[in-house]
Amino acid sequence: MNKLPELLYQHIASHHIKQLELAWLKISPNSEEIISVGGAWQHYFQRLPVSGDSISDICEPLLGMLPFTKDFELPQMQLSEGQYTDISAVKDEECDWLLFCDVTEHTKQLQQYQQASNDLVLLKGELNRTLDRYVGHHVAERVAQGKLQLNLAGERREVSTLFVDIRGFTPFNESHDAQIVMQTLNEYMDGMLAPVLSKDGMVDKIIGDGAMALFGVLDSKYSNAQAAFFAAQDMLKNIATLNKHRQQQGLVQLGIGIGIATGDAVLGMLGSHDRRCFTAIGRHVNVAARLESKACAGEILVDLETYRRLENSDEFVLRRLFLKGIGEVDGYAYGFSK
Amino acid sequence: MLQKKICILGAAGAGKTSLTAQFVYSKFSEKYLSTMGVKIDRKKVVVGDTQVNLMIWDIHGEEKFKKITSSYLRGASGLVMVVDGTRPETITIAKEILQRVEQDVGDLPYVWLLNKADLVDEWSLSERHLNDLKEMNKPIYHTSAKTGEHVEDSFLALAEMLLLG
Ligand SMILES: Nc1nc2c(ncn2[C@@H]2O[C@H](COP(=O)(O)OP(=O)(O)OP(=O)(O)O)[C@@H](O)[C@H]2O)c(=O)[nH]1
Ligand SMILES: [Mg+2]
């Protein structure tokens, strides 16, 4: 490669190196004793270092760091409030060097990225705890208290399965900062999951921006279909309230769609001792998932079996639906269409 | 006067800066400002009848893409290992740091601080996590940088370990 012409080198040097406010200390080999000082020393030290000073008299943080046998770097040392310095220790043939570089500007820029990424880590922790509270913990507690008895071979019973999911979350996710996305998801999740518990349902799993819940597994004063429908109504109310708040704050509002189906399912625990996962397997589970995918924002779609078991069935509108993998079925819609 | 350098280590957001601020200035802030590099604070403590000047290195949090440089630990006499009690994964991070430090600069005396003890509802460490830490045979404190609970105790315990060996 051609050598960089001297003039250009000088140009870059005067541009970039000047900003760094370089200063250096020449140190007696293998000791802490200063021989001489150069560069912008005022930028880093309270007083002019003189020959014979010990390094820790001049720069206390370096106490105990010298002498050294191998070069080392101390990046981003905050020597005084808001000022960041890279310190390099370099061995020469007849002496040691300490080089001081002001990297405040650069560090402050990096700080913003760092902050965003660390905030996200804390938020993720928060989200994990929310989910754990609703999914793992709740079931584990019931099992421990003997309120939920399941034989591992699988037990067959009628349950109502509910799927809920946030409409338009993918475009929202793609057009917003990750931190905002997490925070928003957490808010909506709370609004969707709390009603499941209060109506004796079980959150079976969280799927991205939605969830699957089972009714009829835990004891309840409601029938499984009725409990699922009440929970769905509560979800719509919660989300409407949340959206009102968000509107007042000028934030984006999102809707949710819900599907419910009822039928026999085989229940059981899957997985190992440490993290057991409860699940239900049955034909109607797929129906519920498909209904949810057809529901508009603010709408509850239920299948015929669920509809038959509800008390307030006159509030529904019949909809002929074609469900992928299942075929043509009658769906009953509540909410949106009115 | 006797000078001792101690380093505060742990995952990002575990509360290293908050613990230092509580110990040195009796202050706490809810606002999170990620530490870049290192910030140094000092505090005089008395152990028995010896005065010690602690030089406290509050080091940036360990992250996937930003590991802690071992050269920060040159000349250190002891470590404060901080865990966020609401995030069990921060134990794993602390252990990884410890392993690297021991490889690069050798064994140093240290204490475990399980921080954010005031967040009772969010507390997520189980018996299993605790037993795991107990096996390492170092003092363990449940601290809160917010209320100040056990903050001074834990720093003083470390200072004592440094002097009495
Ligand atoms: N409730 C509570 N919050 C705490 C406690 N300690 C720290 N925090 C909060 O947790 C967040 C992170 O605290 P910091 O002390 O900045 O964490 P750090 O470990 O220094 O973070 P990095 O410098 O990024 O590694 C801040 O919002 C603090 O207010 C505590 O004991 N209780
Ligand atoms: Mg910090």
Image (cartoon, coloured by chain):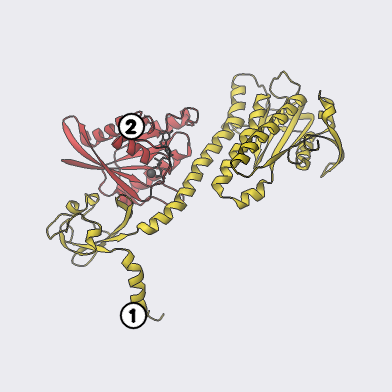
Chain colours: A yellow, B red
Residue A334 in which image quadrant: top right
- The answer to which of A148 and B7 lies nearer the viewer is B7
On whether ligand 1 comes within 8 Å of the CB at mark 1, the answer is no
Query: SS class of the residue under badge 2?
Result: helix
Q: Residue, x 45% and y 51% (percent of image)? A: A114
Residue A13 against residue A63 in the figure, above or below: below
Which quarter of the rendering shows the C terminus of chain B?
Answer: top left
Q: Are marks 1 and 2 on the same chain?
A: no
Q: Residue furthest left?
A: A52
Q: Quadrant of the N terminus of chain B?
A: top left
Cα separation, mark 1 vs mark 2, equals 57 Å
Q: Nearer the viewer, residue B154 or A239?
A: A239
Q: Residue at x 84, y 41 (%)?
A: A326
Circle 2: is it few (<14), some (14-19), or many (20+) Cα within 10 Å?
many
Chain letter of the residue carrying label 1: A
Q: Which residue is mark 1?
A: A6
Q: Is residue A119 found left or right of B28 in the rendered image?
A: right
* Element on which disc 1 rests: helix
Residue B151 bears which disc, if any?
A: 2
Disc 2 residue type (three-letter): Val
In the image, farthest residue toward the front: A248
